[in-house]
Image (cartoon, grey):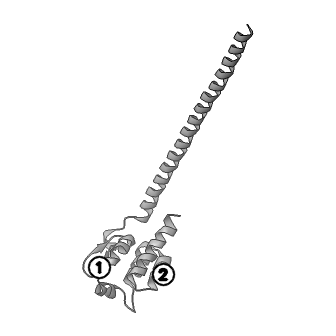
Amino acid sequence: MIIISKIKEVKVKNTTSTDKKVKSKRQTTKNNKQETNKINNKKKSESSKKRIIRKKVFEAIPEEKFFIMVDGKRLKHYIELADELEHFSRETINHHITPFRHDFANWIRDVFEEHELADKILKTNNPHKIRTIIYQHIIRKYLR
């Protein structure tokens, strides 16, 4: 009888530790699901924020306010300007930026009312620096 009771005791102890392991696994699984849900919700939130930011950054302007380059190319936004600057010839740049006027800065100030950005661009005639200034402005204003 003593042997049987000890075997039952051992079985009870083993069953209890197994139950604890199962409960622990269930809890871990539940925690993992909760973490996954939190991450997914955060990603959805970030995604919707990006859509809102994109909408603000790429706000449509009327066609009559597009920037028309000397070669006839039309730019709808200053981000397009930044993207296209590396492809412009030196003559095109010199046409739009002179000691007396800076067409890019004026367009950004007048159409988009981005005075701070326009003031920074006004200080340079280097297309690479203008691109950098525009990209930095977008990062500071919309992505932080």
| Local crowd size for mark 1, using a 10 Å CA cut-off: few (<14), some (14–19), many (≥20) | some
Relative placement, left or right, of 103 versus 89 is right
Q: Position of residue 77 (x, y in %)?
A: 37, 70
Q: Quadrant of residue 9?
A: top right
Name the residue beneath numbered marker 2. 120
Name the residue beneath numbered marker 1. 69
**In-front residue for pair 106/24:** 24
Asked if residue 142 is positioned above or below residue 28 in the image, the reply reads: below
Q: Earlier in the sequence, mark 2 or mark 1?
A: 1
Q: Position of residue 28 (x, y in %)?
A: 59, 36
Q: Position of residue 54 (x, y in %)?
A: 42, 61
The residue at the far right in this view is 2
**Amino acid marked by disc 1:** Met
Q: Position of residue 102 (x, y in %)?
A: 39, 85
Q: Quadrant of the N terminus?
A: top right
Residue sitting at x 39%, y 78%: 107
The disc placed on residue 88 is none
The residue at the far top in this view is 1
**Amino acid marked by disc 2:** Lys
